[in-house]
Image (tube, rainbow, N blue to C red):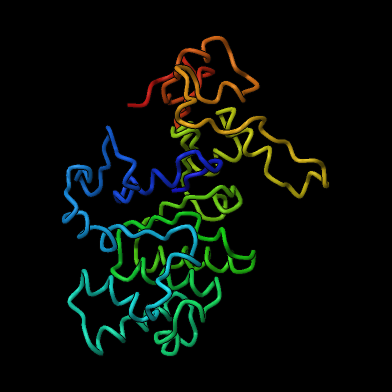
Amino acid sequence: MGVVGESGCGKSVTSLSIVQLLHSNAKITNGEVIFNNRNLLDLNEKEMQKIRGNDISMIFQDPMTSLNPVLTIGKQISEVIKKHKKLKGEQLKKHVIHLLELVGISRASEVYYEYPHQLSGGMKQRVMIAIAIACTPSLLIADEPTTALDVTIQAQILELMKSLMKEVNMSILLITHDLGVVAEMCDRVVVMYAGQVVEMTDTRTLLREPKHPYTIGLIESSPNKSDGGKRLKSIPGQVPTPEQFGTGCRFTDRCSQSMEICINNAPPLLKVDGKTSCRCWLYDRKEEVV
C-alpha cells in the first residue's frame, strides 16, 4: 500500500500514529488503528512495546541519523531480536549475520563489528531494513526509505524490499512522494492532502484515471519522457497548516475546479465507482465510504 502526497500532508504523522511514536506535543484524539482485530489505541505502552519491532516494524526517513553512532551494527540489530526472541550468544550472532546477508551486504561477518560511520548511505539503509525484518513482522512501515540515496541505490533498495516482502511474507505500507516508486512497488495507493485521505484505489487505476483534482495535479507535475523537455506543470500555493484549515474542502484554494459548495462544506470520502474512493464534491451523488 502506497501513501503519497506533498511534504506536510500528514504521511509521516499517520505512520507514527500507527505505532504510537508521536512527539510528546501531539496526541491522537479520535479514530481507531485496527491491527489483527485489535485497536492499538486501546493498548498501553508496555503492550505496544511487544508489538513494535515484532509484529509491526518501521524504517524511518533518514538512515544517516537513524542508527546509533556509538554502537556496532551487530549490537543494534541484536537489540530488537533480544527484546522479542529467545536467542543469545553464538546463535544470536549467526542470526544477525544471516540478516545482513539477506539484505544484500556481502561482507556481513565484518560489518557485524563495524560502526555506522564506516558504512555508505546504501549500506546503512540495508542495516535499517535488517533491523526492521529481524523478527519477521506482519507489517513493515517504510517512511520514504530511499529519499537520501542516489538513484542507483534507490532501485536496489526497492528491489530488495519487494523480494523480502515475498520471502518473509509481510505487508508493506510505503510512504513516498515519488509516483514512479508507487508505480514500481504498490498494489494500492492512498493519496493524502492536509491530513486527510482524498483518494484511494489500486495503482493502475490511480495512474490512468485519477479522480481527485489534487491527484490529477500530482500526476501532471511529474516528469514524463514523452513531454519532450516541456516545462512541468505545478499546483499553485502550498499545503495549509492545521490552523489554516477552514470549514470546507482543504484543497479549495488551490483547486482549478473549486465550486461554491467547496468553500464552507467539507466533502466526505465517497465511493465513486467500483474501484475508487474520492473526497470531492464533484462526486457528491455517489455512495459515502463508512
- The residue drawn where x is 59% and y is 22% is 253
Q: Say which of 236 and 198 sits in front.
A: 236
- Residue sitting at the far top: 260
Q: Does 202 sit left or right of 219 as displayed?
A: left
In the displayed structure, 2 sits above or below 289; it is below
Q: Say which of 200 and 25 sits in front.
A: 25
Quadrant in the rendering for residue 152: bottom right
- The residue drawn where x is 67% and y is 30% is 236
Q: Say which of 191 and 264 sits in front.
A: 264
- In the rendering, at what x and y percent does residue 47 appear? 16, 54
- In the rendering, at what x and y percent does residue 142 appear? 43, 56
Q: Does 220 sit left or right of 240 as displayed?
A: right
Question: Is residue 275 visible in the rendered structure shown here?
Answer: no
- The residue drawn where x is 52% and y is 50% is 176
- In the rendering, at what x and y percent does residue 96 appear? 34, 81
Q: Say which of 74 and 33 sits in front.
A: 74
Quadrant in the rendering for residue 288: top left
Quarter that holds the C terminus: top left
- In the rendering, at what x and y percent does residue 46 appear? 16, 56
In the displayed structure, 43 sits above or below 58; it is above
In the displayed structure, 179 sits above or below 152; it is above
In the displayed structure, 204 sits above or below 169; it is above
Total marks in image? 0
Question: Is residue 66 visible in the rendered structure shown here?
Answer: yes
